[in-house]
Image (cartoon, rainbow, N blue to C red):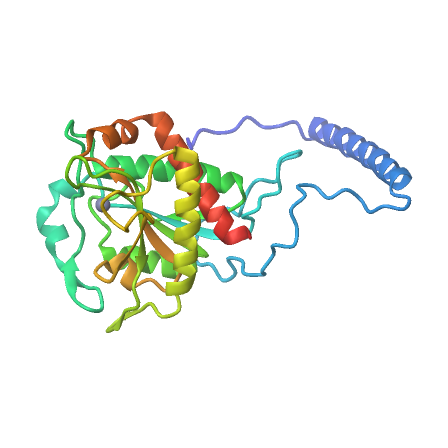
Amino acid sequence: MSNGSTPPVPRRRLRGTLLVVVAAVAVVGLGGWLVWRSSAAGGEPPRAGGISGHGTGHGPAGEDGGDGGHGPRGDGPGKQQGSLRGKVVVIDPGHNPHNRDHGREIARQVDIGNSRKECDTTGTSTDDGYAEASFTLDVARRARTLLQKAGAKVVFTQDGDRAYGPCVDKRAAIGNKAHADAALSLHADGSAAGNRGFHVILPARVTAGPADTAAIVKPSRRLGERLADRFHAITGSARSNYIGDGTGLDVRSDLGGLNLSTVPKVFLECGNMRDPKDAANLTDARWRQKAARGITEGITDFLAH
Ligand code: ZN
């Protein structure tokens, strides 16, 4: 915003305009009320959006994210009221495009409960050099748009706006602090060519040091199953042919982002960047939009049903 002076508004004219607007609103409102009264005989007023009964009362109360009061959206006239209204979704775009310039910082060891691990890693890339960190940010941003349209409050762990990281323990802490109803860490794998398809990584039961996943193992599995179903249906991608015995689900105890989470959380490996056929999808913006839709619907299935 510039500091330039604003031209003075003539007060008298402004007041006159306001009166006209107020009068118009009153007339329209009265008209609408009369129409509603006349059609309400024997029936209840129509409910906008048509979605009810999902309210759990588990809203973002007590949020201290300080985002200036941006609440859930999706309340425009004629639009759906938002099946994710009141829900908090944390998206963790895996890695960071700038990690490669900060080798020393990301190599620092952090406590993940049952062991110590690097703060963060650079991630993989396609053979043509499309970085996993660019992919995860792109899909995350597409999913954020869709999730916000459905009424969710979306929190990112990073938005391409940091020098590196954050470290994996911090990524988990961000989801915890936001009291996320669902948290998702986005990735793409770097396995051998011929290994294809997506898989979801679920938290194992880990109770060690700062890690205690006992309370999130079950809901995270449900989140992962819904995600796998919708991601498969919408992208058309197959479940991994090299991890999870065809289920598209894996369980791991060596990921700080899962070990340290106190909210339902999974990782999604969207495909294998080192396989040419998977890479053709991952580098295709239309496919990435489908991926974002699959993610949004999976999270919605988990949260709204
Ligand atoms: Zn990754």
Horizontal side of 17 relative to 93 (left or right) equals: right
Residue 219: x, y in percent?
A: 43, 61
The residue closer to the viewer here, 133 or 31, is 133
How many tags in the picture?
0
Can you say whether 236 is above or below 217 in the image?
above
The residue closer to the viewer here, 100 or 48, is 48
| Residue 110 lies in quadrant | bottom left
Residue 243: x, y in percent?
A: 24, 49
* Residue occupying image coordinates x 39% and y 58%: 221
* Residue occupying image coordinates x 23% and y 73%: 209
The residue closer to the viewer here, 177 or 186, is 186
Residue 238 visible from this viewpoint? yes
Horizontal side of 275 relative to 282 (left or right) equals: left
Q: Quadrant of ligand 1?
A: top left
The residue closer to the viewer here, 172 or 235, is 235
Residue 157: x, y in percent?
A: 32, 49
Spot the residue most to the front: 245
* Residue occupying image coordinates x 22% and y 45%: 242
Residue 69 visible from this viewpoint? no
Residue 272: x, y in percent?
A: 23, 38
Spot the residue most to the left: 104
* Residue occupying image coordinates x 85% and y 39%: 36
Q: Quadrant of the N terminus?
A: top left
